[in-house]
Image: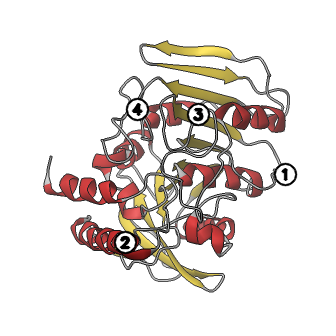
Amino acid sequence: MDSWGRITGLAAALLCAGCLAADSGARGGLRDRLVARAGERIAAQAPPARLLAPGQRIEAPGRYEIRLRHDGLERWALVHVPKSWNASTAMPVVLALHGAGGGAVHQADDASYGLITKAGQAGFIAVFPNGVSPARSGMLATWNAGNCCARARKEDVDDVGFLRAVIEDVKRRTRVDASRVYVIGMSNGAMMSYRMACEAADVIRGIMAVAGTDNTASCRPSRPVAVLHVHARDDELVLFGGGAGRSFRDEDMITDFTSVPSTIGKWVRLNGADPVPRRVLGVAGAWCDLHEAGRGGAPVKLCVTETGGHSWPGGSKLRGGNPSTAVRANDLMWEFFSSL
């Protein structure tokens, strides 16, 4: 493993892989200082990003940073434009949301998640927004996904509005295929992707949620949104069957997560999908069931790995276990989005 991999591995080991517990006392304070320090090292080692001025157009492939003020907060995102980009072609956009305690730089690390490579292969612009964070590096960040997580939830941060603003900002800077804007996420980021499907269906076409269920307080999408859910049977943090995982014992942070079956059932109803699924993939260690879209609706697909814990299938060992190698989340994602 190279130095970048060691640094991201160190930081991830210090992070709660689900909702970041706001421990009180010396133990929590020490942990936060260690994570903040590791985050600064991650930011220092990350590939450089060119900061775009407000309204500045993207004129070449590369890694960019955009900053905007929303709801009284200074917010930012990384934007990766693949080498296949050209100014005359409208490209799809994928917003990739980090898990709680992580940050945009971590989610954009190709050794961890492989999304930069996938963007180059598939030909989409990858956008990595950062949640609200107390650290200069952007680490220790969370999303307000409804019933989770931490500061973002406590302060009722307008993350839906922020992500809408990011999408509009990217549209102003380069040609975007507005009919092919997607949101994906890990853990708390997956939960946030469900909230976007509930409240921003007018601007996104589909989501992929990895290791995070729908914990929204209310959900009235303006139109059907295609849903791909990826989850390990042995996830100990966001339990397949619902409830509070092993990392959520803080009285201040305990969260009774919705189960995977309840999440899928909810979106089958919302999307008007076939309640009887069809097995579309069966390999050693994993399977996928598809609820076909009804007339005027959208599909719902569930992919389950037998092992992998709280992690990104096909990624590196950084969060809550050894990721499953039976399937690759990025391949499942683009196959699903391409079929819509």
Q: Are marks 3 and 2 in contact (CB under 8 Å)?
A: no
> Mark 2 sits on what residue?
32
Q: Which mark is residue 68?
A: none
Secondary element under disc 2, as helix, strand or loop, is helix
Distance CA(mark 2)–CA(mark 1): 37 Å
Q: Is residue 90 visible?
A: no
Residue furthest to the left in view is: 2
Q: In the displayed structure, does residue 191 sit left or right of residue 219?
A: left
Residue nearest the viewer, comparing 56 with 230: 230
Coloring basis for residues: secondary structure
Residue with the mark numbered 4: 308
Q: Residue at x 80, y 22 (%)?
A: 275
Residue to which mark 1 is pinned: 220
Q: CA distance from mark 1 to mark 3?
A: 24 Å
Nearer to us: label 2 or label 1: 2
Ranked by sequence position, the earlier of labels 2 and 4 is 2
Residue 157: x and y in percent read 65, 73
Vertical placement of residue 178 versus 263, above or below: below
Residue 184 horizontal/vertical position (percent): 55, 48
Element type at mark 1: loop
